[in-house]
């Protein structure tokens, strides 16, 4: 029987309890950024979503690896086995997927060892900021923050990694919504939700959760002059 990750780390003089908070696993032309989730009395695991190195596309599914090396996430392993589901990719056999999982596990252990001594909290903050587009800093989050993140559609693994490592997101609603509504089209500002806001929300394909957050925050949309001029010309 192969050694567990915990045993392998002990053999190489790395305290299993002091493993890095983030590791980057490159294998089979894919990259998986795995973030550590560790809480007292609960199993430790690293979670993330693989992406293709060829085109940067993320897998629709995530995976997790526990401290004993067990990998959860067969759909993500399929993605990794197929080098990112390239056009024309064929369905892989169970043997292929088992081999890929084994090699991915070895690459994960290697990444843990290579990250020894790095400032992985800073790396974790950069990773969370890059994926969400929000500023991240050491702080605690309350239930209201978690509900806001849920309505924003932030994935569970991202939220749990931040929580477990004492990090919080800067929930700047105008800055967040500016990523979904063209800045040349409409401005997000304090005010009562109205028909103009409704039109911007519909034409920008905002989710019901996003609209709920805006209204809860006392924000509305004001269409900009350039957008109004285009609208008037289209009616002529």
Image (spheres, rainbow, N blue to C red):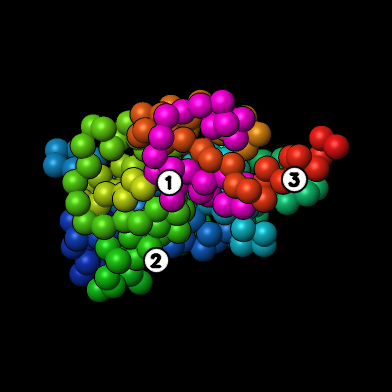
Image location (x, y in percent) of residue 149 = 37, 38
Q: Residue at x 34, y 65 (%)?
A: 123
Does the magenta-highlighted stretch encompass residue 166? no
Discs 2/3, front: 3
Report helix, strand or loop for mark 1: helix
Mark sitting on residue 174: 1
Specify which label sits upstream in the sequence, 1 or 3. 1
Which quadrant is the C terminus positioned in? top right
Q: Are marks 1 and 3 in contact (CB under 8 Å)?
A: no
Q: Nearer the viewer, residue 16 or 206?
A: 206
Residue drawn at x 42%, y 29% as measured from the top left: 192
Residue at x 51% of width, y 38% of height: 221
User: Label 2 vs label 3: CA separation?
Assistant: 56 Å
User: Label for residue 230?
Assistant: 3
The location of residue 144, given as percent across then percent down, is 26, 32
Disc 2 marks which residue?
Answer: 110
Q: Residues within 10 Å of mark 2 (few under 14, many from 20)?
A: some
Vertical position of residue 177 compared to residue 113: above or below: above
Q: Which residues are magenta?
A: 173-200
Q: Which residue occupies the extreme left position in the image? A: 40
């Amino acid at each position: 029987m192969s050694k567990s990750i915990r045993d392998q780390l002990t053999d190489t003089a790395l305290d299993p309890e002091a493993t890095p908070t983030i590791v980057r696993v490159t294998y089979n032309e894919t990259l998986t950024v795995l973030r550590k989730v560790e809480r007292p009395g609960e199993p430790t695991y690293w979670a993330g979503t693989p992406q293709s190195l060829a085109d940067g596309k993320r897998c629709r599914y995530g995976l997790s690896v526990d401290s004993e090396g067990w990998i959860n996430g067969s759909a993500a392993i399929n993605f990794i086995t197929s080098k990112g589901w390239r056009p024309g990719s064929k369905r892989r056999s169970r043997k292929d997927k088992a081999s890929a999982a084994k090699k991915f596990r070895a690459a994960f252990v290697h990444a843990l060892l290579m990250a020894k001594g790095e400032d992985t909290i800073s790396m974790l903050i950069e990773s969370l900021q890059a994926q969400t587009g929000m500023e991240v800093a050491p702080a605690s989050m309350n239930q209201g923050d978690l509900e806001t993140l849920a309505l924003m559609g932030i994935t569970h693994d991202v939220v749990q990694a931040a929580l477990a490592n004492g990090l919080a997101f800067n929930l700047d609603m105008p800055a967040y919504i500016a990523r979904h509504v063209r800045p040349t089209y409409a401005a997000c500002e304090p005010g009562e939700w109205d028909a103009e806001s409704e039109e911007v929300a519909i034409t920008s394909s905002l989710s019901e959760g996003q609209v709920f957050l805006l209204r809860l925050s006392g924000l509305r949309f004001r269409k900009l002059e350039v957008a109004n001029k285009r609208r008037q010309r289209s009616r002529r």
